[in-house]
Amino acid sequence: MEKLITIGEAAQRTGLSAKMIRHYEASGLLKCSKRSEAGYRLYDSQQLQLLGVIKQARKLGFPIAQIQSLLDLLQNPDRTSREVKSIAQRHLNEIEHKINELQQMRETLKQLSDNCSGDENANCPILDGLCQNSLK
Amino acid sequence: MEKLITIGEAAQRTGLSAKMIRHYEASGLLKCSKRSEAGYRLYDSQQLQLLGVIKQARKLGFPIAQIQSLLDLLQNPDRTSREVKSIAQRHLNEIEHKINELQQMRETLKQLSDNCSGDENANCPILDGLCQNSLK
DNA sequence: GTTGACCTTACCATCAAGGGAAGCTTCACA
DNA sequence: TGTGAAGCTTCCCTTGATGGTAAGGTCAAC
């Protein structure tokens, strides 16, 4: 006899919020199979495990759609690690792209900021930089 | 006699989309002062300049609310560069925080990915990593 | 005078997350 | 047995920057 838990306990165990567990369900990630007579969602330990996977994947920044694919692969014994790695690689590229964008911003902003005295004076290289005419 | 331009030309000159110029106006960033008889927005060169500032600031990732403050300071002769620098510094911290988060994700993901053979095998360290039981 | 490019407003979607309302259920304790 | 608190349900709204689309008015060139 499998122990079933309510959404609140599942939330506590996984570190997700009950709100988000319902949201993931609505997004098609993990449909809850059982309900109590009163309509409460009931999760077994396998589903709890999958919720844990969702939590970990979100922590790594995977978008819902990719988590969907990962969950599918996880539950498919015919998967290949190539398929999994491909998803991870795509996400890794995405992450690196974002890092590059942010580093670009940081460099530019840091240069402007370093040139700014930050005192009572109205003159400001940061504003000057923003006014730099890039108009066509 | 100042030359006035329509939103389409302003968009072209600044690199913003007409859509976003209207959006910035709705957000209170830059209200367009003049309309043609037919109701078309008309921008003078000073406003075009400010739109350019908005464009540059967005390029650096500043959120609308901070751009609001920057525009206010830009147009206020009594500003101090300290105020400007403070805004830039806050945003810089924000950027660095995001970079750190992403780098964290990258490291973890890269480790998992490097351990994955990416072949026909079903066994996959990436999935194993995601299943890593973090349940309470 | 018609066509095509441009403008207007208004509404909807994205993405992950959360807020809050209104109403039902469960449980513990007096 | 009653009551109150805590937990659950669904539904709708908000965030932030951006884009899409629709329905309609305007302007200029041919």
Image (cartoon, coloured by chain):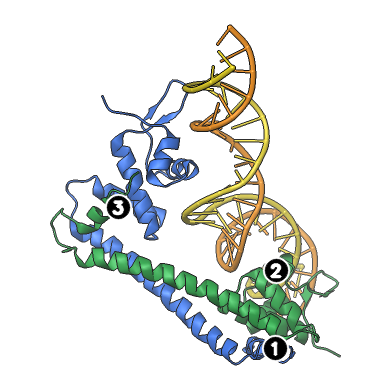
Chain colours: A blue, B green, C yellow, D orange
Quadrant in which residue B88 is drawn: bottom right
Left/right placement of residue B135 relative to residue B60 reads left
Give amino acid for label 3: Leu
Judging by the rendered image, the residue that carries numbered circle 1 is: A119
Judging by the rendered image, the residue that carries numbered circle 3 is: A70
- Look at discs 3 and 2 and give the one toward the viewer: 3
Please give the chain letter of the residue carrying mark 3. A
Quarter that holds the N terminus of chain A: top left
**How many labels were placed on the picture?**
3
Label 3 and label 2 in one chain? no
Give amino acid for label 1: Asp
- Element at badge 2? helix
| Residue ID at (20%, 58%) | B125
Give amino acid for label 2: Arg
- Look at discs 1 and 2 and give the one toward the viewer: 1
Q: Residues under labels 3 and 2: Cα distance?
A: 40 Å
- Element at badge 1? loop
Residue A67 picture location, percent across and down: 35, 53
Residue B123 picture location, percent across and down: 15, 54
Residue A58 picture location, percent across and down: 39, 55
Judging by the rendered image, the residue that carries numbered circle 2 is: B22
